[in-house]
Amino acid sequence: MFKLSKKIQSLPPYLFLEIDKAKRKARAAGRDIIDLGVGDPDQPTPAHIIEKLYSAAKDPATHRYALDQGMPVLRQAIADWYKNRFNVELNPETEILPLIGSKEGLAHFPLAFLNPGDYSLVPDPCYPPYKGGSILAGGRPYLMPLVEANDFLPDLKKIPLNIRRKAKLIYLNYPNNPTAAVAQGSFYEAALEFARKNKIIVISDLAYSEIAYDGYRPRSFLEIEGAKGAAIEFHSLSKTYNMTGWRIGWACGNAALIAALAKTKSNIDSGIFSAIQLAGIAALGGPQQHTKEMCRLYQERRDVLCGGLNALGWQVMPPKATFYLWLKIPAKSNSVKFSQLLLERADIVVTPGVGFGKYGEGYIRMALTVDKERIKEAVERLRKAV
Ligand SMILES: *Cc1c(COP(=O)(O)O)cnc(C)c1O
């Protein structure tokens, strides 16, 4: 009776639904499920951030509509954090825009720049809002395969000329979800040159910059000389401070791109709850020790899981960043079947690679967001089951 719009109809199917359903069913049947599927930190938000939310929420001044460009003090805290972390200078008035989590910004940004028939260049596999946001804006995602042979970086030389001409945006995400790959400065330089030559806007998603191991420090795309002329970078408090449920992030970079996103969003939302903005300042400006401890914890889990899987003959390289393992599955299986098999035989939930795009087929993603003892148990179950 109600006919869905063409845009909604052309959104990629939500393949995780099947797995979710199977997981709920298994739990309801009383099975002890180890969930390595969700990319959501298991540890709580640091106490000083929660304390700030309490006190700020008691002040009636925080109860009204927030400024939709974010509080000036928050924008200043973000500028200070970027300067301190990446040595990148940002004008807090024109080059920073707080967001209700970076996901909404990543998904809304194409509305500001795509016309019907325009392309956005999206990696495949990828975080789903890059494709979804491009389609909802009336554009067409052009898939850039992320394959192991190219270190899970898009091969920009392979993008055909006719696509380059009609492309307005390119999404980059390093450290990467779901492949856990990282990018070197030389790739960023090549990407910037490609973007400038073809008049394409670079969208850099830096959600995992602080989740890294073995002394590796991810870089910002804005560190590349001249990047601010062509790029907008999205960042988030979600992974750095275990704040996924709070919904706070930001966009920063080129002032005209920031202004366009702000104009778009002024028609959609009315800003972030002020008490959460004040708590965000406490996060960015407060002690950073907690994030280091989180990385130590993830690193320990990573080593237990990689070590365990390698002992079973899986041949896993420990990732340098993110809390994911991107694992090749036997060639005769596929990622959905293999995920179902792990659930049936070992009570383990993983994410099938194809859920992130067709080039994710042949892989599964495991998240390091459960404690070490459960990871050991998962390895033991795999040893018995597979
Ligand atoms: C978790 C994640 C984000 C952050 O999303 P928020 O909306 O800020 O919580 C952004 N990009 C990727 C690739 C992610 O995995």
Image: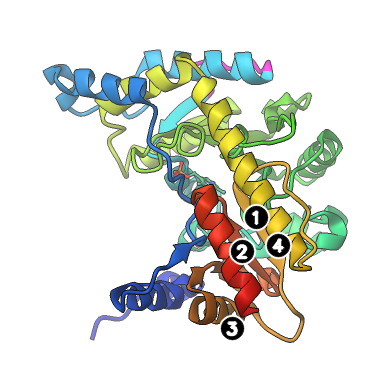
What is the CA distance from the residue labelled 4 to the residue labelled 2? 7 Å
The secondary element bearing badge 1 is classed as helix
Instruction: Of the two numbered discs 3 and 1 on the same chain, state the one appearing first in sequence.
Output: 1
Mark 1 surroundings within 10 Å by alpha-carbon count, few (fewer than 14), some (14 through 19), many (20 or more): many
Measuring from the top left, give residue 57's x and y in whole percent.
18, 24
In this picture, residue 58 sits left or right of residue 120: left
Measuring from the top left, give residue 53's x and y in whole percent.
26, 24
The answer to whether the residues at label 2 and label 3 have Cβ atoms under 8 Å apart is no
The residue tagged 3 is 337
The answer to whether the residues at label 4 and label 3 have Cβ atoms under 8 Å apart is no
Mark 2 surroundings within 10 Å by alpha-carbon count, few (fewer than 14), some (14 through 19), many (20 or more): many
Instruction: Of the two numbered discs 2 and 3 on the same chain, state the one appearing first in sequence.
Output: 3
The answer to whether the residues at label 4 and label 1 have Cβ atoms under 8 Å apart is yes
The kind of residue on which mark 3 rests is: Lys
The answer to whether the residues at label 3 and label 1 have Cβ atoms under 8 Å apart is no
The residue tagged 2 is 379
The residue tagged 1 is 305
| Range of residues picked out in magenta | 87-95
The kind of residue on which mark 4 rests is: Leu
